[in-house]
Image (cartoon, rainbow, N blue to C red):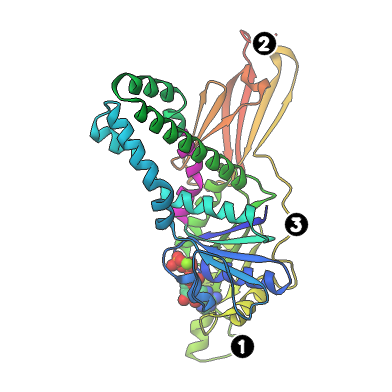
Amino acid sequence: MSRVLLFTGKGGVGKTTLSAATAASLAAHGRKALVVSTDPAHSLGDALDVRLSAEPSEVDGSGGLFACQIDPRGLVDEAWGELRGHLRTVLAGAGVDELDAEELTVLPGVEELLALAEVRRLASSGPWEVVVVDCGPTAETLRLLSLPEAFAGYLERLFPTHRRVVRGLLAGVAGTGTVEKWDATADALSRLAERLDALRTMLADPSGCSVRLVLTPERVVAAETRRTLTALALQGIHVDSVIANRLVPSPGAARGAAATWLRTRRQEQDAVLAELTGIGEIRTVDHRASEPVGVPALLEVAAQLYGDEDPLPSAAVPESLLEVSGSGRGLDARYSLRIALPLADDTELDLARVGDDLALTVDGRRRLVALPSLLRRCIVTGAEMDSGGVTVGFRPDPSLWR
Ligand SMILES: Nc1ncnc2c1ncn2[C@@H]1O[C@H](COP(=O)(O)OP(=O)(O)OP(=O)(O)O)[C@@H](O)[C@H]1O
Ligand SMILES: [Mg+2]
């Protein structure tokens, strides 16, 4: 399995440019790299100054850089179209109302999901050491990254419970042909669920997959960057660096109107970056006079971005989202569960105990956190939040404790 680097960020900040530059630099250092775009606009090809297709091809004069352009629409037609047709016929045959059947077969976000599943396929089948992915803008990508979970839940609702029920229904109302069709559809859906499961495993494994968040030093972008960091952490997805693109050059001691403009602009940009504290080191790339197009220009960008460092550092040690600590004995014991998450001052947080899980809702995004067994026998006593996460207090539940 190749390492996977996902580049994301707000629209237009430089995701395509920086993912292409990173892949070009990896290839130039003798590491087999593939850069993939899931964006239907042909911007990756534009940045590399080549024509791309859905199949990886080597970029001329790049010394081993491969690139391709995933076509999500085509994947949907190929993988989902037929399945959907089957499912609709079968459901209608089982007496499910035409409209309900339509609703059941329009699954949310199938396009994005299949694009990511295709990335996983490329990463697990190709000769590449690294697959660099030029993802869509943040909001969209986030939705996309949380999809496997949502989607798998959706499939679980249909299967396997419904499978038997529907099959029984079909045997009663339709011929054996329909039952066979249903079995084929059910099998295809289970395979899809398996693929999604593999995808989720890939996304949440920090040693195999990480995100590079791109921003430009502007206030609105910085605010969104914080929210994105929180949302990714909530999903257990590792962010290995934050990159500020398009810093205007500092004019030094030069004078005149142009120098004053640059100085003011740069001071503002520096101020925005200075406010982004507590998120680790931010790498920077200058705003260049001409657009970095083609491998040589991209390599210059990469040289500034990574300096002498390896663009692909050794895989992160998986750090746990959860940590339990405690003191005291028996019923007097007090425990606390620390959930590590970067949080902003205005983050809206909601916590609820749902059986053996904690339901954590951050700015409208929800995640279930399975409680360690010790804490399942406890009662929640309170919760506190700070910029680094949430601490939930527990004490033993006398009715469950022995
Ligand atoms: N450091 C830079 N200096 C000068 N121009 C840049 C720099 N980074 C990116 N650009 C230019 O800015 C434009 C937008 O960059 P790019 O396409 O990489 O952004 P993007 O985040 O992929 O955008 P989108 O959200 O539309 O996919 C491009 O024309 C690109 O050549
Ligand atoms: Mg782009």
Callout 2: few (<14), some (14-19), or many (20+) C-alpha neighbours within 10 Å? few
Residue 247 seen in the figure: no
Q: SS for tag 2?
A: loop
Q: Nearer the viewer, mark 3 or mark 1?
A: 3
Tag 3: amino acid: Ser
Is residue 146 within the magenta segment? yes
Amino acid type shown at disc 2: Trp
Q: Give the magenta-colored segment's residue range.
A: 138-153
Say few, some or many: other residues with alpha carbon within 10 Å of mark 1 (under 14 / 14 to 19 / 20 or more): few
**At x 45% / y 62%, what residue is drawn?**
39
Which x, y percent locates residue 249?
Answer: 58, 81
- Asked whether the beta carbons under mark 3 and mark 1 sit within 8 Å of each other, the answer is no
- Most common SS among magenta residues: helix
Mark 2: C-beta under 8 Å from nearest atom of ligand 1: no
The alpha-carbon separation of the residues under discs 3 and 1 comes to 40 Å
Find residue 135 and report its horizontal and vertical position in percent: 50, 59
Looking at the rendered image, the disc whose residue lies closer to the viewer, 1 or 2, is 2
Which residue is labeled 2 in the image?
A: 401
Q: Locate residue 81, reporting x and y percent.
A: 37, 47
Asked whether residue 392 appears in the rendered view, the answer is yes
Would you identify the image quadrant in which residue 86 lies?
Answer: top left
Which residue reaches farthest left? 98
